[in-house]
Image (tube, rainbow, N blue to C red):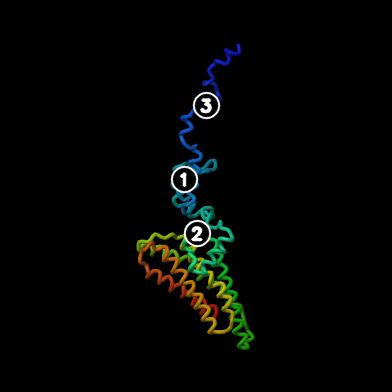
Amino acid sequence: MDEGYSNLPTSHLLGSVPAVTQDDRKLGPPAAQVADAAATSRLQEFPPGGGNVGGYRPPGGPADGDVENQADWKGYFNVASYAPYFNVDTDVVVDRLISSVYPMDGFYRKIDANPDMYGPLWITTTLIFMLAVFGNYATYLVQTKKDMDIWNFDVGYFSWAASVMYSYAIIVPVVFFFLFQYFGSRPSLVRFWCMWGYSLFIFIPASVLLLIPVGFLQWVIIALAGGASSWFITLNLKECTEGADLMVLMASASVLQFALALFIKVYFFA
């Protein structure tokens, strides 16, 4: 009786699983692992998720063709696409701040694999508040030195600082990005934003030192800060030119950086 039941064919039964043969083991990794590897590789695109969208898709989402059409442009307007550029450790940001003050430390090579936007945003915003506050305080010190009793906080310092610094940190890298592409180089816009943002860090300690009410010393401080920032921009642009002779563009970027330093001195610490 038992032998009869044991000889019945079971391949047609529901729930039966065929055994894994030796040939099946040679077919390679499962399809799920291949899909995961492809999704991981897409994290290197800008913005993340801007290419062919894979991975998890919520129920009721659009069809594959609709996703492909939307991913071409909607990725740039999705906040989650820019989250990787703000996912940096404090040690990484501090190391890049030090490299921005010491230009010979190879800053562009450090951000080549993982440029961030957290540092530039923090630096630019901090510099705006420091210029507005310290600019007003420098005016107060000058009026106190002249025995002037009336002093009012100038809110225009804040609006001017925000307009100039945010515009400079956003527009100037975009302009040079297109200029470098026009002349045959292939830079990265995100790396340009990162580099120009960190180049402003030197003006934060400089704005503190500019509170010293000595005119000659103030000009020396702003000249050193502007020169260091200009040299930082020049060295890093040279690393991304890929051997092309773009000295005119690098010199223009250096002059703009020094002109920004002069604007800080003349407008906020006159």
The image quadrant that residue 251 belongs to is: bottom left
Q: Position of residue 223 (x, y in %)?
A: 49, 78
Disc nearer the start of the sequence (1/3): 3
Q: Dot 2: what SS? A: loop
Q: Give the labeled residue for mark 2.
A: 115
Disc nearer the start of the sequence (1/2): 1
Given this view, does label 1 or label 2 mark the residue nearer the observer? 2
Distance from Cα at disc 1 to Cα at disc 2: 27 Å
Q: Label 1: how many residues lie within 10 Å, few (<14), some (14-19) or many (20+)?
A: some
The image quadrant that residue 3 belongs to is: top right
Q: Dot 3: what SS? A: loop
Q: Residue at the location (35% across, 61% down)? A: 184
- Give the amino acid type for the residue marked by disc 1 in the picture: Val
Q: Label 3: how many residues lie within 10 Å, few (<14), some (14-19) or many (20+)?
A: few
Q: Give the labeled residue for mark 1.
A: 67
Distance from Cα at disc 2 to Cα at disc 3: 49 Å
Q: Give the labeled residue for mark 3.
A: 19
Nearer to the camera, 263 or 221: 221
Q: Position of residue 80 (x, y in %)?
A: 54, 53
